[in-house]
Image (cartoon, rainbow, N blue to C red):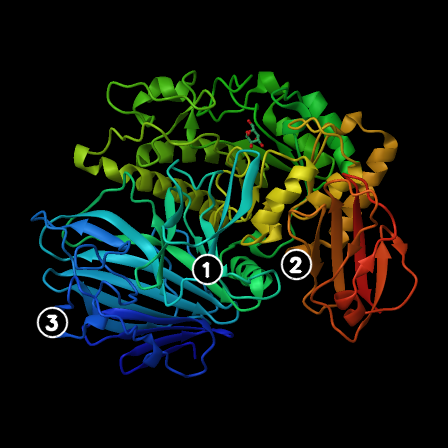
C-alpha cells in the first residue's frame, strides 16, 4: 500500500522513497519529508524548526514556529505571510490578493485520474495509488486540490494542482505553480539543462547560495534554451552515489523552476507555468487545472534518478502502439535533398535505403503546395504534384513496393504570409491589433487557442492521412511565440493566450492520436526546442537537435539522457562533412552515436560507395539485433561530458547483455583509453567481451568488468569510437 493517512499525517511510499506531509496545529498542510524510504516512521518530530518568526507572528495564537514565514508548506498562497515564492497568487473579485489556504479534506483515489486537456502519467493497470488533498481559503470558498500519485515500482511521485472557484465572483489567477517542495536543508547544487539551437540541453550545475536560482522559458515553448527538467542534489552527488531529486514538467509551453534558500537555511523549490504574461480569469464554478510535475528521489546518484525517469516515461507516459513496439528505422529526406523533393531522386535514395534495411522513408519539408523554400506555403497542407513530379500517392506506392513504410513532415502550428490559409484567414495568426506579427523563419504562428483554426488544420491533415498510406509524421515547429494576442478573446483574457495555445496544440495532437492510433508521431522544434514530457505523451520520439555532428551530438544526448529515455531520442546518421559544422567524422562514429537513439539516416545515400552501403547495412542489422536492449535496457553514463572521451552503456533487465560505446571527443594521443568501470552487470557471471566485432581473449567476470574495466589497448583519435558487446556466457 503506497498511501497511508494516519491522524494528521499523510504518507506516500514507493519502493525506495517516502513522501510525507502533515496538517499542523494551524491547519496548514506542512511538508515533512521527501527522501529514502522511512518504513512507517514519522518525520513529524524533527520537522519543528526551532525558529521563531518575528514578522508576522503566527495567526491564531499558535506557536510562531508554525508561522507561514518559516514553516515548510506543501502549497501556499500569496498574501498570508509566506514570503517565499508562493505557488499560488490570485485576486478575488473585490481586488484582494490575500489568500490563506488551510487543510480541508483528504481522500484516497484508486485509479490515477487523467488531467483534462493535459498530458500526464497514466496507469491503466491501476497499480499506483493517489491521494487528493483539498485546501480552502479561510474566508472565500476558493479550493485548491493537490493530487499526488505514487508510482511504487518506478520510485516516482506525480503532483498536480487544480484551483476551483466557488467564491460567487470572478477570480484572476496570476500564478498557479504545480509543485512546491520545502526542504529542511540547503546544501544543494541546482542542475539545469540549458543551451541554444544546435546545442540543446547542456548540463549546468550551480551551488545554491543566498540568492534564488531559476530556470525558465518565456518563448511560448519549453525551448532550446532551458529544459523543463531540473535536479537538485547533495554536493557530493555523482553518477553512482549521493542524493538527488528531480522535477520534470509535463508541459510544453512557458515554465519556471526555481530554488531559493530561506532566512533559516531551508529551501523552497517550485515549478510550474511561468507567471509572466499569465493571467487567467476563472468564473464562479470553474476550475483551472495546472499541469503535472514528475518527481523522483534517488539516494544512488544520478544513474538511479535516470533509471526512474526512463522507466516511468516508458511505462506510464508513452501511449499507444509505439509505447512498446520496436521503432522503425527511418531515412529522412531533409539533409538528403532539402527542398528538392523530386520523385525520381527520392525513389533512387529509397532504393539504397532498402538495401541498408530502412523500415520507413520520410519525406520532410517541401512536399506541399508551392513550398519551394521556407518563405511560403505553411498552412496549405495539400500535396504539390508538380513539385514532387508525381501524385503523392504514386510516390508512396513506389516506396511501399520497395517494402518500406512512408512518413511525412508537417508544421501544423505555423502559417506563411504567402499561403491560401493566410489569405482566407488572416485572423488566425497570433498578432496584436494594428501590428504585423514578427516573422520567425519567415513565418507566423497560428492562434492555436482558436478552435476553428485547430479544426481546419486537423481537417487538412486528415485529408492527407486518410487518402494516403502514411505510418509516421514528423510534427515540426520552427519558431518561438511573439505577438501573443488572440483576436478571439476579450482584453481581460489576453493573459490566457499562452496557455490556451499549448492546450490547442495538445487538443490537435490528441485528435490525431485518437483517429490514427497506429501512426507514429515524432515531434521536433528546429531540432530539440520542445523536448519535454508534455510532447512525449503524444509523440514518443523527438528529433533531439538539428546538429547531427557526432562530436556535438554526444553532449546533447548526454544532457538529454538524464531524464528522457534513449528511445525517445530522434538520432540519424548524416553526411560527412557535417552540413551544420563542416566537420569530418568516421562513418562508424556517426552510426555509434545515432544508435543511442531511434537510429536512422538523413543523407543522400546515392552518393555513398557500395562499400559504405554495405557497412550501413551491417550497422542496421546490428541496431536491430540490439533494439530491445537500447529501447528497454538500463542506461548508464560511464563518464561525464568533459573528459577527452565520453562513454555510455546499456544493460538488459536480466543483465545478460550489455553494450558500451566510447567516443573520443578530443585527442589524447599518449593514452589508450580504459573504460574504468562498467555498470549494472552480475558480479559472478562470466561475460564474453567483443570489441568492435572481435572477441577479446580472456575471462571477464562481472566483478572484473565493474571494478577494473576494459583497456581498449589502442589509441583512439579524435572522432573515433569503439563498441563493446558484453554477453553472459
Ligand atoms: C527544422 C527541422 C529539420 C527539418 C526542417 C525542415 O529545421 O528541425 O529537421 O525538418 O525544419 O524545414
The numbered dot on residue 636 is 2
- Residue at left offset 49%, top offset 17%: 375
Foreground pick, 422 / 514: 422
Q: Is residue 313 left or right of residue 72?
A: right
Foreground pick, 157 / 508: 157
Q: x, y (%) of residue 202?
A: 55, 44
Dot 3 or dot 1: first in sequence order is 3
Give SS at disc 1. strand
The numbered dot on residue 188 is 1
Q: Is residue 9 left or right of residue 672?
A: left
> What's the CA distance linking mark 2 and mark 3?
52 Å
Pointer 2 local density, CA inside 10 Å: few below 14, some 14–19, many at least 20: many
Residue 116 in sight? yes
Q: x, y (%) of residue 430?
A: 33, 28
Q: Is mark 1 within 8 Å of ligand 1?
A: no
Pointer 1 local density, CA inside 10 Å: few below 14, some 14–19, many at least 20: many
Dot 2 or dot 3: first in sequence order is 3
> What's the CA distance linking mark 3 and mark 1?
34 Å
- Residue at left offset 59%, top offset 41%: 471
Dot 1 or dot 2: first in sequence order is 1
The numbered dot on residue 60 is 3
Mark nearest the camera among 3 and 1 is 1
Badges 1 and 2: C-beta atoms under 8 Å apart?
no
Residue 25 vertical position relative to residue 364 in the rendered view, above or below:
below
**Which quadrant is home to the C terminus?**
bottom right
Q: Is mark 2 within 8 Å of ligand 1?
A: no
Badges 3 and 1: C-beta atoms under 8 Å apart?
no
Mark nearest the camera among 1 and 2 is 1
Residue 520 in sight? no
Give SS at disc 3. helix
Foreground pick, 622 / 407: 622
Amino acid at each position: 500500500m503506497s498511501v497511508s493517512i494516519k491522524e494528521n499525517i499523510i504518507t506516500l511510499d514507493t519502493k525506495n522513497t517516502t513522501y510525507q506531509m502533515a496538517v499542523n496545529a494551524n491547519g496548514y498542510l506542512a511538508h515533512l519529508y521527501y527522501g529514502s524510504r522511512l518504513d512507517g516512521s514519522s518525520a513529524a518530530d524533527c520537522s519543528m524548526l526551532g525558529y521563531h518568526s518575528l514578522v508576522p507572528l503566527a495567526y491564531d495564537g499558535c506557536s510562531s514556529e508554525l508561522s507561514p514565514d518559516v514553516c515548510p508548506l506543501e502549497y501556499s498562497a500569496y498574501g498570508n505571510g509566506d514570503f517565499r515564492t508562493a505557488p499560488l497568487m490570485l485576486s478575488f473579485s473585490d481586488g484582494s490578493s490575500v489568500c490563506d489556504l488551510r487543510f480541508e479534506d483528504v481522500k484516497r483515489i484508486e485509479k490515477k485520474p487523467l488531467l483534462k486537456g493535459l498530458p500526464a502519467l497514466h496507469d491503466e493497470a491501476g497499480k499506483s495509488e493517489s491521494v487528493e488533498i483539498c485546501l480552502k481559503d479561510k474566508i472565500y470558498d476558493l479550493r485548491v486540490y493537490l493530487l499526488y500519485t505514487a508510482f511504487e515500482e518506478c520510485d516516482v511521485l506525480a503532483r498536480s494542482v487544480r484551483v476551483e472557484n466557488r467564491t460567487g465572483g470572478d477570480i484572476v489567477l496570476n500564478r498557479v505553480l504545480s509543485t512546491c517542495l520545502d526542504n529542511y536543508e540547503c546544501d544543494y547544487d541546482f542542475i539545469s539543462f540549458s543551451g541554444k539551437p544546435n546545442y540543446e540541453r547542456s548540463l549546468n550545475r550551480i551551488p545554491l547560495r543566498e540568492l534564488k536560482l531559476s530556470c525558465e522559458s518565456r518563448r511560448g515553448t519549453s525551448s532550446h534554451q532551458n529544459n523543463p527538467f531540473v535536479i537538485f542534489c547533495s554536493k557530493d552527488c555523482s553518477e553512482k552515489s549521493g542524493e538527488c531529486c528531480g522535477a520534470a514538467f509535463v508541459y510544453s509551453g512557458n515554465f519556471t523552476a526555481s530554488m531559493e534558500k530561506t532566512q533559516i537555511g531551508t529551501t523552497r523549490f517550485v515549478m510550474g507555468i511561468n507567471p509572466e504574461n499569465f493571467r487567467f480569469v476563472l468564473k464562479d464554478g470553474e476550475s483551472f487545472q495546472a499541469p503535472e510535475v514528475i518527481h523522483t528521489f534517488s539516494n544512488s546518484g544520478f544513474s538511479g534518478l535516470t533509471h526512474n525517469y526512463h522507466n516511468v516515461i516508458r511505462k506510464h507516459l508513452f501511449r499507444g502502439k509505439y509505447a512498446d513496439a520496436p521503432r522503425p528505422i527511418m531515412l529522412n529526406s531533409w539533409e538528403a535533398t532539402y527542398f528538392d523533393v523530386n520523385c525520381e531522386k527520392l525513389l533512387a535514395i529509397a532504393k539504397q535505403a532498402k538495401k541498408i534495411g530502412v523500415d520507413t522513408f520520410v519525406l520532410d519539408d517541401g512536399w506541399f503546395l508551392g513550398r519551394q523554400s521556407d518563405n511560403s506555403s505553411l498552412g496549405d497542407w495539400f500535396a504539390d504534384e508538380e513539385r514532387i513530379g508525381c501524385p503523392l500517392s504514386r510516390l508512396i506506392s513506389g516506396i511501399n513496393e520497395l517494402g518500406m513504410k512512408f512518413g511525412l513532415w508537417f508544421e501544423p502550428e505555423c502559417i506563411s504570409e504567402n499561403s491560401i490559409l493566410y489569405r482566407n484567414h488572416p485572423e488566425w495568426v497570433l498578432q496584436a491589433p494594428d501590428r504585423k506579427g514578427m516573422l520567425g523563419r519567415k513565418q507566423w504562428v497560428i492562434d492555436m487557442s482558436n478552435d476553428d483554426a485547430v479544426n481546419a488544420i486537423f481537417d487538412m491533415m486528415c485529408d492527407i492521412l486518410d487518402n494516403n498510406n502514411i505510418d509516421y509524421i514528423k510534427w515540426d515547429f520552427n519558431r518561438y511565440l511573439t505577438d501573443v494576442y488572440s483576436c478571439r478573446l476579450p482584453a481581460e483574457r489576453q493573459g490566457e493566450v499562452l496557455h490556451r495555445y499549448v492546450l490547442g496544440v495538445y487538443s490537435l495532437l490528441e485528435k490525431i492520436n485518437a483517429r490514427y492510433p497506429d501512426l507514429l508521431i515524432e515531434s521536433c522544434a528546429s531540432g530539440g526546442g520542445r523536448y519535454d514530457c508534455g510532447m512525449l505523451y503524444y509523440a514518443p520520439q523527438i528529433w533531439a537537435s538539428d546538429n547531427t555532428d557526432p562530436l556535438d551530438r554526444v553532449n546533447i544526448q548526454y544532457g538529454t539522457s538524464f531524464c528522457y529515455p534513449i528511445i525517445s531520442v530522434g538520432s540519424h546518421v548524416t553526411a560527412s562533412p557535417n552540413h551544420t559544422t563542416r566537420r569530418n567524422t568516421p562513418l562508424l562514429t556517426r552510426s555509434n552515436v545515432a544508435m543511442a537513439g531511434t537510429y536512422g539516416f538523413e543523407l543522400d545515400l546515392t552518393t555513398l560507395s557500395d562499400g559504405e552501403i554495405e557497412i550501413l547495412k551491417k550497422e542496421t542489422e546490428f541496431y536491430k539485433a540490439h533494439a530491445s536492449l537500447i529501447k528497454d535496457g538500463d542506461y548508464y553514463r560511464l563518464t561525464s561530458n568533459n573528459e577527452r572521451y565520453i562513454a555510455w552503456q546499456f544493460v538488459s533487465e536480466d543483465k545478460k547483455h550489455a553494450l558500451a560505446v566510447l567516443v573520443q571527443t578530443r585527442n589524447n594521443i599518449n593514452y589508450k583509453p580504459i573504460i574504468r568501470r562498467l555498470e549494472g552487470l552480475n558480479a559472478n557471471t562470466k561475460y564474453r567481451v567483443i570489441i568492435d566485432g572481435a572477441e577479446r581473449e580472456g575471462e571477464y567476470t562481472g566483478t572484473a568488468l565493474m571494478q577494473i574495466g576494459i583497456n581498449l589497448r589502442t589509441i583512439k583519435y579524435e572522432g573515433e569510437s569503439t563498441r563493446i558487446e558484453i554477453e553472459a556466457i
